[in-house]
Image: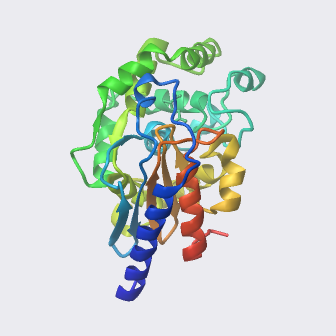
């Protein structure tokens, strides 16, 4: 991107931040994880990593937040890299029209979760990620992956958020026990839930998260992390299921593969062009960042980067 185009985009991001900071309707922060309930809803940040290596940011792009379900993208990358297409015997590739922590869907489908981004699917993916003789017993490999992808060794887990979610993870426990009763979890539920809650409690800021998404955007510099065909597959799943039962609306209005988390972050990928992280903690009815989605829609309209 030329110098003038970069300046124009930076000016747009600064204006976007100002508009988002002024917005009255901001959504509600997640309440079911006690530590997230106290986050200030008035924050907004965005960071864009371009294929040319430049990074543009605005707003609270350096403020850390809980990435929550965005971590499912990284655990999927490791599980897919490890097991290849065998992974799809345990978890599907189809969108879901139930909420992300639906119990009924899992029973209807005989214990095979619809996709790796609903909670049941992420539990299976994390189980598969750790299911190898050389996998160690915790999240070391995932943390290495995320730190390498972001190029930042300081990324860490907020143990208070993890403990707070684990103490109240009744719904995820019920999914895990059901999966285990169907033979689709190999690890004990308590151990798996401890690891899953810690994975969701990885803390990053928009700058780090946008950097960590570069391996999905097909930038040459990140190709060693995952083969390009598998990165493309993850983009397809993000487009179809990354925003749960709000994925159709996100694809329609934004037009990028994206993955949201209940901490209010969204990682969005524009293949060949950009990796984008946006964060605003207030959520819409589907559990996706309300202003994050709006900001990405405005960015998509401004740049014409929709994949369609
Ligand atoms: N959508 C999300 O971010 C959900 C993640 C959260 N840790 C949960 O399992 O409920």
Percent of width and height locating residue 245: 70, 41
Compare residues 26 and 51 and report the one nearer the observer. 26
User: Which quadrant is the N terminus positioned in?
Assistant: bottom left
Q: Is residue 137 visible?
A: no
Q: Quadrant of the C terminus?
A: bottom right
297 vs 116: above or below:
below
Q: Residue at x 28, y 47 (%)?
A: 147
Q: Is residue 97 left or right of residue 193?
A: right
**Residue found farthest to the right:** 108
* Corner quadrant of residue 243: top right
Looking at this view, is 7 or 97 the one in front?
7
Instruction: Name the image colouring.
Output: rainbow
Count of marks overlaid on the render: 0
**Image spot of residue 270 (x, y percent):** 52, 66
Q: Position of residue 14 (x, y in %)?
A: 41, 69
Q: Considering only vertical position in the picture, is 102 above or below 145?
A: above
Left or right: where 42 falls relative to 155: right
Identify the residue shown where x is 37% and y is 63%.
58
């Amino acid at each position: 991107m030329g110098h003038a185009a970069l300046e124009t985009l930076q000016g747009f991001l600064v204006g976007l931040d100002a508009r988002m900071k002024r917005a009255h309707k901001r959504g509600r922060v997640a309440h079911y994880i006690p530590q997230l309930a106290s986050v200030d809803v008035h924050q907004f940040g965005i960071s864009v990593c371009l294929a040319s290596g430049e990074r543009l940011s605005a707003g609270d792009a350096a403020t850390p937040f809980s990435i929550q379900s965005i971590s499912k993208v990284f655990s999927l990358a490791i599980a897919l890299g490890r097991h290849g297409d065998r992974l799809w015997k345990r978890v599907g590739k189809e969108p879901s029209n139930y909420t992300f922590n639906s119990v009924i869907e899992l029973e209807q489908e005989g214990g095979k979760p619809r996709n790796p981004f609903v909670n049941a699917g992420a539990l299976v993916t994390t189980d598969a990620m750790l299911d190898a003789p050389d996998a160690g017993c915790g999240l070391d490999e995932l943390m290495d992956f995320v730190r390498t992808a972001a190029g930042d060794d300081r990324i860490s887990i907020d143990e208070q958020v993890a403990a707070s979610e684990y103490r109240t993870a009744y719904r995820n426990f019920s999914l895990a026990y059901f999966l285990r009763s169907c033979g689709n979890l190999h690890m004990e539920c308590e151990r798996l839930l401890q690891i899953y809650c810690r994975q969701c409690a990885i803390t990053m800021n928009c700058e780090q998260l946008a950097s960590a998404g570069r391996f999905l955007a097909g930038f040459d510099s990140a190709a060693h992390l995952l083969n390009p065909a598998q990165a493309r597959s993850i983009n397809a799943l993000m487009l179809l299921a990354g925003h749960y039962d709000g994925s159709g609306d996100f694809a329609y209005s934004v037009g990028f593969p994206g993955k949201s988390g209940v901490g209010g972050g969204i990682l969005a990928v524009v293949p060949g062009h950009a990796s984008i992280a946006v964060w605003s903690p207030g959520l819409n009815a589907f559990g996706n960042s309300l202003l994050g989605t709006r900001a990405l829609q405005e960015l998509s309209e401004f740049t014409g980067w929709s994949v369609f």
